Amino acid sequence: MDFENAIEIKNLTKKYDGFTLDNVSFEVPKGSIMGFIGQNGAGKTTTINSLLNIIKWDSGEIKLLGKEMPRYENEVKEQMAAIFDVLPFNDDLSAKQLTKIMRGIWKEWDEDCFKNYLERFQLPYTKKFGQFSKGMKMKLQIAAGLSHKAKLLIMDEATTGLDPVVRNEILDIFLEYLQDEDNSILMSSHITSDLEKVADMVTFIDKGKILLTGIKDEILENHGVVKCSKNDFRDFEREDYISARVTDFGAEIMVSDRDKTSRKYSGAVIDKTTLEEIMLFYVNQSKNQWS
Amino acid sequence: MKELIYREFYLSRKNILITCGITFGIYAIGVMCALSARFGNIARYVSDEMTIHDVLVTTYYFAILSGILLATIVECVPILLASDFKSGWTDYILSSGVSVKKIVGVKYLVFVIILVASMGASAIIFGLTRLVTGVDAEPILPSEISFGIYEPVIFVVFMSVFLLIMVSYRLMSEFVFRDNKSVKAQVIQNAPTVVGVLLIFALFFYGTCRYDMADKDEIARLSETMSKIREHSIEVIIGAILLGLIISGVFYFISVWAVRKEMKCERKSV
């Protein structure tokens, strides 16, 4: 596999009535999990649908597994698996019928591998999907996705609505899948705790624009929250912080360079932060302060 | 391809079986009447030949009703397509390596298979009716303009062509409007079917009224025209089928275009 990035998006633009995906660019290196974070309506699904070529994008370039889309679409899609937030297979089907259908869709469909995953996930072979729980349906989609030798998993809100036990189980499967360094995952979610556990890289999107993209550990390392009084907050210059939450009890200020902040504002206590807090402060960065 | 066709039939099997069951039930009543008129109680206790003949001919109406019921099975294809859009199956299969032509083609192919099978079954039902009753179908149209014993065949062919055009249109509009539930989309999707059915009924009643009010000269002219058409019945039937297939083909290409419209234009197969 002679490519560095499993996904390369450059200046992707798609205009809808009242929403624009605006020059979205990011990369997912081969062998990594990219967490794609944003609130509902931020543009995650539009980006993913563009990647899958389900919707027509207006401008920009997309390369998947080193190949230009949509030129090599059929070849690339054979090596990809899309996992959606709802089960796309009819409730009237069972795994037994699904495996027959999948043989006609995926050239590399491996029936034995699928059966092994079903056994491992404790999913019944003949029970109709309509009787499956949400967790079982998600596991089924993952089993189907992993049974045709996909090199790239693209997941749209796949863990949303699942209980923590199932979510953890699924995250473990992803980590196991990444043991093969040719495999990569793009995982969109607004449950940042999941991404904090497994993602190597994260990209934040809001109102169709990329706010931040990079290595997760570096982002968490560099960002921090300064907790101080309202009076101390007034000393902060605007270019030194992302945004600030000011309440009657004091101020919380998100900074993107902890070292620089501690040098410039000696005595400021900078706490570690989470992806959720970073998302909240970035989403509100257009406001000088918010409560 | 065959796996996707299997999916269509598997998911439509309940609709198909229920319709076949109802058809069988209705046709069985007709057959029982015919058997009774030939060998059973009606034959034993009714001495009037005309009454027995009328009972036997009535079986053909059961056959026509059965044919219409079987033809409605084709509706399961656009119904399943609408549910595919809703469930996300269409997005899933578009995210796989299956080509758009194949995705759309499977729907049209399954529709044509069901149509041919249901029309074939209708033809068998008519043949069976002839065998059971032992009498020919009485033409519905007046003798001057009738196609005689070929009327059921003409009926089956024209119903097939009508369904070919209407259901192809339904499929195309599903692909164009996807899961759009707006009033405009609903009207555009369903209006041609409603207008088509109403037009057929209107033409039938207009023709009946005109015939009833026509004088001898007019009937003679009509009879002459019909005899010319009868001479070219085969060409008329083939022409109607070709017309249906061409229109259906155009709807198929519009469907492929509609699905691709939502996707990148510079598509290259590898």
Image (cartoon, rainbow, N blue to C red):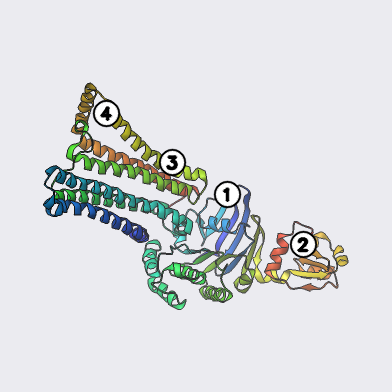
Q: Secondary structure at mark 4?
A: helix
| Same chain letter for marks 1 and 4 | no
Number of the front mark, 1 or 3: 3
Residue designated by label 2: A243
Tell me if mark 2 has few (under 14), some (14-19) or many (20+) residues whose alpha carbon lies within 10 angstroms of its own: many
* Residue in the foreground of this view, choosing between A246 and B261: A246
Q: Quadrant of residue B228?
A: top left
Q: CA distance from mark 2 to mark 1?
A: 31 Å
Q: Residue at x 29, y 58 (%)?
A: B21
- Which numbered disc flags the more N-terminal residue, 2 or 1? 1
Q: Amino acid at mark 2?
A: Ser
Residue wearing tag 1: A59
Question: What residue is at 64 percent from the left and 61 percent from the top?
Answer: A39
Q: Nearer the viewer, residue A176 or A264?
A: A176
Q: Tags 1 and 4 in contact by the CB under 8 Å rule?
A: no
Marks 3 and 2 in Cβ contact (< 8 Å): no
Tell me the element at label 2.
Answer: strand
Does B196 appear above or below A167? above
Question: Label 4 sits on what residue type?
Answer: Asp
Neighbours of disc 3 within 10 Å: few (<14), some (14-19), many (20+): few
| Residue that badge 3 annotates | B191
Residue carrying label 4: B212
